[in-house]
Every structure is written in structure tokens, then in C-alpha cells.
Image (cartoon, grey):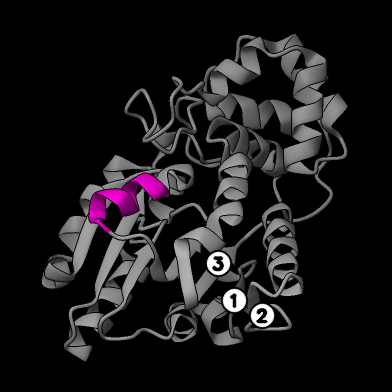
Amino acid sequence: MHTPVMLRECVEYLSIRPNGVYADLTCGLGGHSGAIARQLKSLGGVGRLIACDRDAESLEMAKANLADCADKIHFHQSVFSRVGDVLAAEGISQLDGLLADLGVSKYQLTDGGRGFSLMADGPLDMRMSRTGVSAGLSHIQRTAADIVNYESEKELADLIFRKGEERRSRKIARAIVRARPITTTGQLAKLIEGAVPRTSKLHPATQTFMALRLEVNQEMEELDSLLASLARWVKPNGRVVMLTFMSIEDRKVKQSFQALAKEGRATLLNRHVVKPTEEETRENPAARSAKLRAIEMN
């Protein structure tokens, strides 16, 4: 099971009201969604939760995990850029609160067949939705193998540097191109480990894998779409809570929230980023890089 990060803090910052309509845009296996739905149920109003995820497999598991509060939840397979369509389908124009956890679930990371893992060998896939056309996306998604085997050396190096923030991107791209075809995560990880030295506890392929995942799923582009739409989707006095795990995402969220505050369209709820407690990181090491930011719309 995936352990939801900063669960208590997320629910507190959402400031859930009994008759409110909330959205968890990254439902995953249902950790945060369950906490929101159960609180709505305990408050006794007519409030409900819209639980979205682009991964159909995760959504099915979430439905099973949340059977005890299913009457409070409406599930939708969707990406950030199509949330407007989800709201229209639900017959609402704005939300009382929105949560987005930008991390990858433990289920996705540890299932070798999904192609995200450095440790569990599997096909070089990395699609968060494996249903051909990703939920709401108009194009057939490329897999990580498509990118690794068919992009030019320069395009690969630029991608690894830009989205992975990997300074050794040119050396890695050169090694990849010379070793083609590459079909598995284990093959790619071993190749990168041989091409560049280990300089920290992190596996030397970590940032390259991150870049490929972000590109395959167009995560930065989807995040841009979400951030640009917050003032339209969340009503005045409504809350937005976001969890990030990578500096490239946190910068985008921080800058967007600050811009909304400067324009007078939102109020920052935490001047300084909120991080997990020492106790939480001890119990759940995956939480150690998490950062929470929250705003209230004006």
C-alpha cells in the first residue's frame, strides 16, 4: 500500500466544510481521498469529493480501498488539463477545495511492469496510463523506450538536462545512443551507471529516469495547465493544496502561488514551505523530499 504523505496537514489546509465540493486530482490508491471523504461523511452535510487520476489501474484499486465512503466520492479518469470537463460532467462550475499530490505512488514505482523502477527490471514504459490514448490526452503516448531509442542524441541530452536537471546529460545521451536498442529499465539503469560515476547516495540514473517519466506523461505541461486554471476552478475562500517532491515542480507551484498572491487573487497560507515531521520521514522515508504549499482564493 502507498502511504499518503502529510495526510493530516493536507486535510487541515483544505479546511473541509460539510456542504463543500472538493477534488483530489491525484487519487492514486485513495489515501488522501479517503481522509477527505471520511471527514465529509463525519460532518454530515451534502458535501462530496471528486476523485481523479489518469491511471485507470490505480483508480480501480482506490474504489476498492474506499468502499466504506463510496457514497461521498465520484471517480473520474482524467488529466489536469481536462478537469474542466470533469466539473462540467458533475454539473458544477467551481470547487471549495482542490488537492494535487504530484508524487508517483509506491504501487507504480515498485511494480516492475510499469517501467518506473530503477530496482525492479521491467519494460521501459513509464506511462501513468496504459490504456493507449491517455485519459483526456488527444495523442497516443510514447513510452520511455520510444524516446530512448528514437530521439537524437542532442534531443535526449537537452531533455535529460531540462527535465531531469542532470548536468551530465550529454555523456548519458551519448552512452544511450551508442547502446541502442534499449528495452528494459534494468538495461538503461546499468548503462547509465557505467557511463557516469556515482556522486551521492542517489543512483546515477535517478535524474534521467525522472526526466523520461516527466516527458512520457507530459507532467510539466499538465501542471502548467492546472496552475493557470486555479482561479477559474476554485471559488473565493476555496483552498488549493499541492504536494511536490521535485525541485522543478516546487518552483513552478511556488512561483504560480506567489503570482496569484501578488495579483490579489489568492492569499498564501504558508509563507514558508511545509515539510514532513521527523517522525513521518522515519516511518515513511519516501516522504522526505515532500513539500506542501497552500493558498486560499480571494
Q: Which residue is mark 3?
A: 242
Asked if residue 87 is among those painted magenta in the image, a careful observer would answer yes
Q: Which residue is mark 2?
A: 268
Give the position of the C terminus as an image quadrant. Answer: bottom right
Question: Which label's residue is closer to the chain start, 2 or 3?
Answer: 3
Residue 5 spot, x, y in % from top left:
48, 71
Asked if residue 72 is among those painted magenta in the image, a careful observer would answer no
Q: Secondary structure at mark 2?
A: strand
Is residue 268 visible in the rendered image? The answer is yes
Is residue 5 visible in the rendered image? The answer is no
> Which residue is at the front of the view, 23 or 183?
23
Q: Would residue 113 be found to the left or right of residue 65 on screen?
A: right
Q: How many marks?
A: 3
Give the class, few, some or many, for how many residues have Cα within 10 Å of label 3's Cα (few <14, many ≥20).
some
Magenta stretch: give its range.
84-91
Question: In the image, what residue type sits under mark 2?
Answer: Leu
> Which residue is at the front of the view, 286 or 93?
93
Q: Secondary structure at mark 3?
A: strand
Q: Would residue 293 be found to the left or right of residue 94 on screen?
A: right
Question: In the image, what residue type sits under mark 1?
Answer: Ile
Q: Nearer the viewer, mark 3 or mark 1?
A: 1
Residue 248 spot, x, y in % from top left:
73, 52
